[in-house]
Each structure stands twice: as C-alpha cells, then as structure tokens.
Amino acid sequence: MFGSRRYRQRIADLTARVELLVDQRDTARKDAADYLGAAKRTAARNVRLSAQLEAVRPPAPLRDALTYTGRIARLARTVARLRQALAAETRRADRLQDRLDDACGITQPAVDAGAMWQHRRSDRPKEDMR
C-alpha cells in the first residue's frame, strides 16, 4: 500500500494527536464561551449592585463626617504628642534659664532684698494727682 508499517503507525499517531488537539480546542472554545457568559452576568450584577449602593449611600454631610472621623482622631493624637513635646521643651528652657540666672548672680538674696528699691527711693518723683 502506501508504505511500511512504521509509516502507517506514524500516520495513525499523528491522526490521533490531531483529533486530541481538535477535542482540546473545542473544549477550550466551550470553556471560553462559558467564562464570557459568566463575566457578562457578573458585570450586569455589578451594575445593579452599584445602583443599589448609590441608593443606600449616606448623604454627603454624613459621608464626610464618617470620612473625617479617622483624620480627626489622627490629628488629636498628633496634638497630644506635640503638647507633650512642648511641655518637655518648656521644662528644659526653664532649667536653662535657672542655670543662667545662677551664673549671672540673679538668684542671690541681695537681689531679692533690693527688688522694691524703686518704691522706697527718696528722690522719687511725685505722681500728679490731677
């Protein structure tokens, strides 16, 4: 006939392979059509659900309040942290001022004793009583 037994066997193997590939192609086409249909149904359902979500969405002022709640909480924590930092820096500045006062001799008792010397001056100008 048309050649040797090996040649006929090779033709039979290739024919079987082609039939298998055709079956896989047909299955893939069917699966693709099924997936496309499912995707279309899902898209249509998403459109309906989006419309329903818009219908139940809170009004703009309430939505804004809900949106800003988290932001307000973060800002409140930041303000508290900044207040603590300010208090720490104020304490530090006060300590440094005390050290400067000590270095300049302002904290000596003699300075405190003469604090009111302006009021006790003998040559102090008299206030007009007009």
Image (spheres, helix red, strand yellow):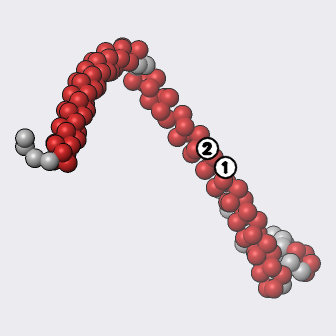
Residue 53 or residue 82, whichever sits in front: 53
> Residue 18: horizontal and vertical position, in percent?
18, 37
Classify mark 2: residues with Cα within 10 Å, few (<14), some (14-19) or many (20+): few
Residue 114 or residue 111, whichever sits in front: 111
Asked if residue 130 lies left or right of residue 25, the reply is right
Task: Kindly indicate whether the residue at mark 2 contacts the one at mark 1 (C-beta within 8 angstroms).
Answer: yes
Residue at (81% x, 70% y) in the render? 119
Give the amino acid type for the residue marked by disc 1 in the picture: Ala
> Residue 101: horizontal and vertical position, in percent?
80, 79
Q: Quadrant of residue 69?
A: top right
Can the viewer see residue 43?
Answer: no
Q: Quadrant of residue 127?
A: bottom right
Q: In the rendering, which numbered label is found on residue 76?
A: 2
Is 8 situated above or below 62? Answer: below
Classify mark 1: residues with Cα within 10 Å, few (<14), some (14-19) or many (20+): few
Q: Residue furthest left?
A: 2
Q: Secondary structure at mark 1?
A: helix
